[in-house]
Image: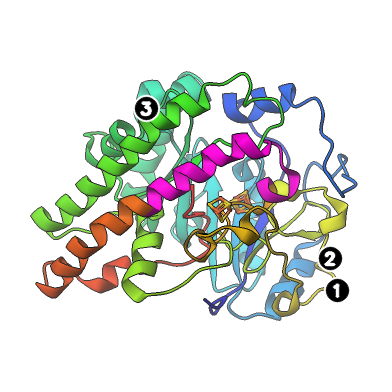
Amino acid sequence: MGRGESTFFHVILTTECNLQCTYCFGEAIEDVDPDFPDSEVDYHLPRIISYGTETLDRFCRQDPDCVLTFYGGEPLLQIDKVKSIMDNVHTKHFMIQTNGLFLNGLEPEYVNRFHTILVSLDGDEDTTDSFRGKGTFRKVINNLKLIRKNGFEGEVIARMTIMEPIDVYKQVNWLLGNAEFLFSSVHWQLNAGFWKNDFQRRKFHEWISQSYNPGIHSLAKSWVDRMADRGVVLRLYPFLGIAQSFLEGETQNMLRCGGGWANYAIQTDGYIVPCPTMWGMKNYYLGHIDSANPLNLKQIFVGEPCSNCDILDICGGRCLYANITKRWDKEAYASVCDTVRNLIESISEQTPRIRNLIKEQKINPKSFEYMKYNGCEIIP
Ligand code: SF4
Ligand code: SF4
């Protein structure tokens, strides 16, 4: 699989966030031993961008197909910077990953230019608010209704962070079928392998075997049932990416998120890293936007255990950050790989049905196409 036409960059606009979500803020406090193998870490990045917009423009102009995704912290804490970059930097597309709370503060003339908005929600109101704070859900949903009313026609992707006790089957179906705001695009990522001390405290293993894995299996079936009943291919990104590979007979031995080879991140100080989570890891700095060429950046690949895995050619490696930093030990991470196997098997099992539906012209094979490296990692 090639990198495609565009290079993608997460632009970290600020290191600050206005929320204190359990799986991010809470864990960062507990992660008191931030030693990273083989890398010196710069913990003192500027709070906001310290390079000039014209430097970013010069960098992007070297690749006319460059795609920028605003990222943080929470990028809409820097609304003026968002506008200034959208006014002055030449790109193919702009996208944003946001918690959605300040979307009402950005004028429609800017919002409506986003190709895609990825908004953090974990499912229904109780679930979202229990992780992200009371009132978050209502505010985000109101903002999403507002941007649609104001003419936003691009893709809105609900980006879920999943961990125990979330019932993935129930919550994804809630997003797809509720009376508040109907999502047709959903992505989820497991909170797994990112923090040093959490596995021992959590019940991750029990949760994946009793809830998450069976939930994914049922969800894959209901995804294809919906294709058969209504001719609709919902954009459940983890399913979409793997199904597309099966349908096209494509192998995938590079990270499906694009981290380190197709989708990079620009820190607030202008240094380029393989992925936003690798901010400050000096040994992985790939150049600075004042001198680097976006079309000629070094590529970083996953190592053990992924490099020797029997399903690397369909998984692609899940996560470079987790692979490099090894925050979870081998046994703990094996549980994560079990979820990958289960996901792949669940889609593989449904693929003959999908092929039949295509053959019978009940669904269009083009419905499985998507913009790769749009911020959905595919492998949760
Ligand atoms: S299943 Fe696990 S070990 Fe195998 S490629 Fe994926 S993340 Fe790596
Ligand atoms: S999966 Fe890992 S490497 Fe890829 S974008 Fe997410 S955190 Fe970065």
Q: Position of residue 4 (x, y in %)?
A: 53, 77
The amino acid on which the numbered mark 3 sits, given as a three-letter code, is Gln
Residue 44 vs residue 235, the one in the foreground? 235
Q: CA distance from mark 1 to mark 3?
A: 51 Å
The label number, if any, that marks residue 210 in the structure image = 3
Q: Quadrant of residue 331?
A: top right
Which mark's residue is nearer the viewer, 3 or 2? 3
Judging by the rendered image, the residue that carries numbered circle 1 is 291
Q: Is residue 306 left or right of residue 4?
A: right
Q: Main secondary structure of the magenta part?
A: helix
Whichever of labels 1 and 3 marks the residue nearer the N terminus, that label is: 3
The answer to whether residue 318 is seen in the rendering is: yes
Q: Secondary structure at mark 3?
A: helix
In the rendered view, tell whether residue 375 sits above or below residue 164: below
The amino acid on which the numbered mark 1 sits, given as a three-letter code, is Ser
Residue 176 vs residue 300, the one in the foreground? 300
Q: Is residue 10 left or right of residue 163?
A: right
The label number, if any, that marks residue 288 in the structure image = 2
Which residue does the image show at 72% across and 70% down from the upper left? 299
Q: Quadrant of residue 7?
A: bottom right
Which mark's residue is nearer the viewer, 1 or 3? 3
Q: CA distance from mark 3 to mark 2?
A: 46 Å
Q: Secondary structure at mark 2?
A: loop
